[in-house]
Amino acid sequence: MSGPVRLERMRWWHVEQLMPVERELFAPQPWTERLFWSELGQPDTRHYLVALAGDGPQAQVAGYAGLCDHPDEAFVQTLAVAPPAQGSGLGSRLLVALLEEAGRRRQRTVSLEVRADNAPAQRLYDRHGFVRTGVRRGYYAGGVDALVLTRRA
């Protein structure tokens, strides 16, 4: 992916464009289009972003991320960077944007789950102040644990 990458609010028409990335990164348990549409249908408690590389109808999804605003904490629902854009700092940009939104919503605690075998994602979250607060044993396909990470402002 070349050219500048811009972040914008995810809309329903982005879902079809991001599904190849979702299936590639999160197989064998990717989210469905229906699940994304359900999340987008809750704007009072959800905030989803898409990262687009290029302009106009030729723009490609380089990444996306979503935040859920619960009464007592925010939760990073998803964060994905397409393989060609990995290592570019886009994951950090998306995460910072979610953290800023959590702050606007007056959330002091943000949590997430990450695969125990996803070291690059764990390093990203560590750089942004997340600490391990729990483990969900066998949470992911293949029996992979989920690490619960939390950041408090």
Image (cartoon, rainbow, N blue to C red):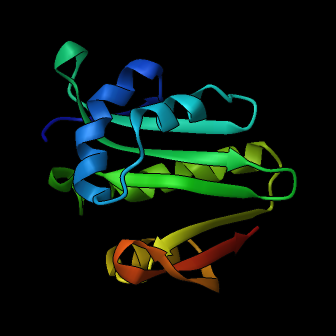
- Work out which residue is located at the far top of the displayed protein and give it: 56
Q: To which quarter of the image does residue 4 belong?
A: top left
Relative height, residue 105 to residue 123 (above, below) = above
Q: Quadrant of the N terminus?
A: top left
The answer to whether one can see residue 130 in this image is no
Q: To which quarter of the image does residue 42 belong?
A: top right
Closest to the observer, 117 or 143: 143
Please report the residue visible at 22 percent of the width from the left and 24 percent of the height from the top. Answer: 59
Count up the numbered dots.
Answer: 0
The reply, left or right, for residue 15 in relation to residue 2 is right
The reply, left or right, for residue 77 in relation to residue 62 is right
The reply, left or right, for residue 93 in relation to residue 63 is right
Please report the residue visible at 31 percent of the width from the left and 36 percent of the height from the top. Answer: 18
Q: Position of residue 51 (x, y in %)?
A: 36, 37
Please report the residue visible at 31 percent of the width from the left and 52 percent of the height from the top. Answer: 81
Closest to the observer, 10 or 127: 10
Please report the residue visible at 34 percent of the width from the left and 78 percent of the height from the top. Answer: 142
The answer to whether one can see residue 99 in this image is yes
Closest to the observer, 19 or 122: 19
Q: Position of residue 15 (x, y in %)?
A: 38, 29
Closest to the observer, 132 or 38: 38
Q: Position of residue 111 (x, y in %)?
A: 66, 66
